Amino acid sequence: MEKLIKQWLLEPWVLKLVITIVGLLVIRLILGTLRRNLPRYVKESQARYRVRKLISLGGYLLVLLFLALVFKKELGGLTVFLGLASAGLAFALQEVIISLAGGIAIATGNFYNTGDRIKIGGITGDVFDIGVLSTTLMECGEWVKADLPTGRLVRLANSQIFREPVFNYSVDFPFLWDEITIPIKYGTNYNLAQEIFTRTLTEVVGDYVEYAKRAWKDIVTEYFTEEAMIDPEVTLTFHDNWIELTGRFITDYRKRRHTKDKIFTRLLEEIDKTDGQVGIATTTFELAESPPLHVRLTGT
């Protein structure tokens, strides 16, 4: 019996199977140790995420290399078969191959990173995870206003970056220009209204402006573009029923609703202090001609 076991263990395929099992267990132990301990030394969350992804990718490559070394003779015999089957596999797995290429492009082309807010294929969301074949987003917008999260996770194939434009809200320049319009009554002090509007914007978004100016300098240095108007600006136009003031300002892309709430609140407070010099307009209608009115009285 002992002799039979020894002969069985000396079989080439059995020996390779044992080597494979032991090697995979060792690789799993090494990767598990790295995954638990290495991210502890990285303080920034984005960097920790990248470290975990690199460990996982390195594990896949190490397993493939190990298996290729163990079964190199067997793989040599499969070369002709794989060459004949490659065309069929490429056609059958074209979406997977394009998604894999998209994953490589995302990793090397700075399309977006985890934590970025993007819009692709008509879907807006914050990037939760970037996989080899797909990207996971926390959806924003849809039935929720002001680009707030809806709670739904959306998984998109990485091949989408070759088919759809990618809008990135946060890469390089993490600010957005936004606008608020308010209607002012004719006959009121529109100069005072414009002054109040400008002062309010400056007070609310003044901190954003300084950060945005520094960020825009980096944009001008890296890309072919010109200086932009970062400071708040209020412009005036008039319509049939009111004077319209439009305030343009810079804001953090994650705080659009909060910023607008502060601006509107301050505007109402300041307008109330003018004692009627500035009034918010409402829609009015002018009746040019009244239709004929016929009244018939009947006795009872």
Image: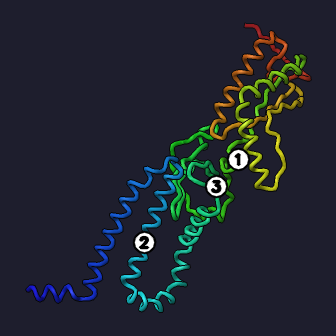
Q: Residue at position x 36%, y 82% from top?
A: 70
Q: Are marks 1 and 2 in contact (CB under 8 Å)?
A: no
Q: Are marks 3 and 1 in contact (CB under 8 Å)?
A: no
Which tag is nearer the camera, tag 2 or tag 3?
A: 2
Which tag is nearer the camera, tag 3 or tag 1?
A: 1
Question: What SS does tag 2 mark?
Answer: helix
Q: Would you place residue 211 above or below residue 90 in this image? A: above
Residue 210 lies, in percent from the top left, at: 74, 36
Disc 1/disc 2 C-alpha distance (Å): 38 Å
Question: Callout 2, which amino acid?
Answer: Leu
Q: Are marks 2 and 3 in contact (CB under 8 Å)?
A: no
- Does residue 235 appear left or right of residue 126 in this picture? right
Residue holding disc 2: 62
Residue holding disc 1: 173
- Does residue 100 appear left or right of residue 236 in this picture? left
Which of marks 2 and 1 precedes in the sequence?
A: 2
Residue 128 lies, in percent from the top left, at: 52, 51
Front residue of this view, candidates 253 and 162: 253
Q: Quadrant of residue 196?
A: top right
Disc 3/disc 1 C-alpha distance (Å): 18 Å
Q: Would you place residue 153 above or below residue 53 in this image? A: above
Disc 2/disc 3 C-alpha distance (Å): 33 Å
Q: Would you place residue 274 above or below residue 8 in this image? A: above
Which of marks 1 and 3 precedes in the sequence?
A: 3
Neighbourhood count class around disc 1 (C-alpha, 10 Å): few under 14, some 14–19, many 20 upward? some
